Amino acid sequence: MNFPVNLLRVEKARLYGVRGSYSVDINIAPFFLECCQEECFDQPIIINGLPIDEEKLEEMAGRCYQFPKSDERSHLVDASVYVQHAHHPVDVNSVSFGNIQNGRMSIEIDLTFIFSFEGLCDYGDVGVALRFEIPVS
């Protein structure tokens, strides 16, 4: 059974933190999972510890950062999503920042949901790229 990545729609996202350790909270529009209609996918994807060396958001514009998989020792990024009474790990493969236009910056985060770790229905691990914009002051 394939996880319905086509239903993952970003409602709101927030980037915050300090140089060397940024976090992203990604709120997804709620939807019900086919395998368990009583279970709604409605919790945010939480990403902590992004090792980005830039101090200001403007310095990230036009850059792409790649990260090792979570099973490698040098991995510092901690990411998960809470679904069906379990925290499912999420590998953050890369974060790409677009250019600033009209006071907004586009961001694309390439993720892999590791549903095989805790088991979510019969879903296997699945990759997805989520795109959203954030304001730049």
Image (cartoon, helix red, strand yellow):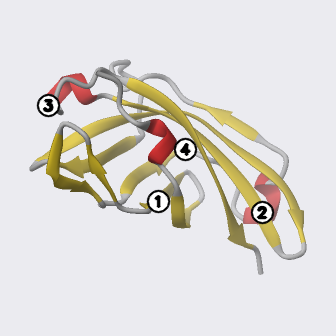
Disc 4 marks a residue whose amino acid type is Pro
Q: Tag 3, which secondary structure?
A: helix
Disc 1 marks a residue whose amino acid type is Ile
Q: Residue at x 49, y 58 (%)?
A: 24
Q: Position of residue 105 (x, y in %)?
A: 78, 63
Count of marks, rendered view? 4
- Label 3 Cα crowd, 10 Å radius (few <14 / some 14-19 / many 20+): some
In the rendered image, the vertical position of residue 26 relative to residue 65, given as above or below: below
Q: Residue at x 55, y 63 (%)?
A: 18
Question: In the image, which is nearer the foreground, mark 2 or mark 4?
Answer: 2
Return the residue at label 2. Answer: 105
Mark positioned earlier in the residue sequence (4 or 1):
1
Disc 2 marks a residue whose amino acid type is Met
Dividing the picture into quadrants, the one containing residue 43 is bottom left
Q: Is residue 132 left or right of residue 45?
A: right
Q: Tag 1, which secondary structure?
A: strand
In the rendered image, the vertical position of residue 37 relative to residue 89, given as above or below: below
Return the residue at label 4. Answer: 51
Report the quarter where the C terminus lies.
bottom right
Return the residue at label 1. Answer: 26
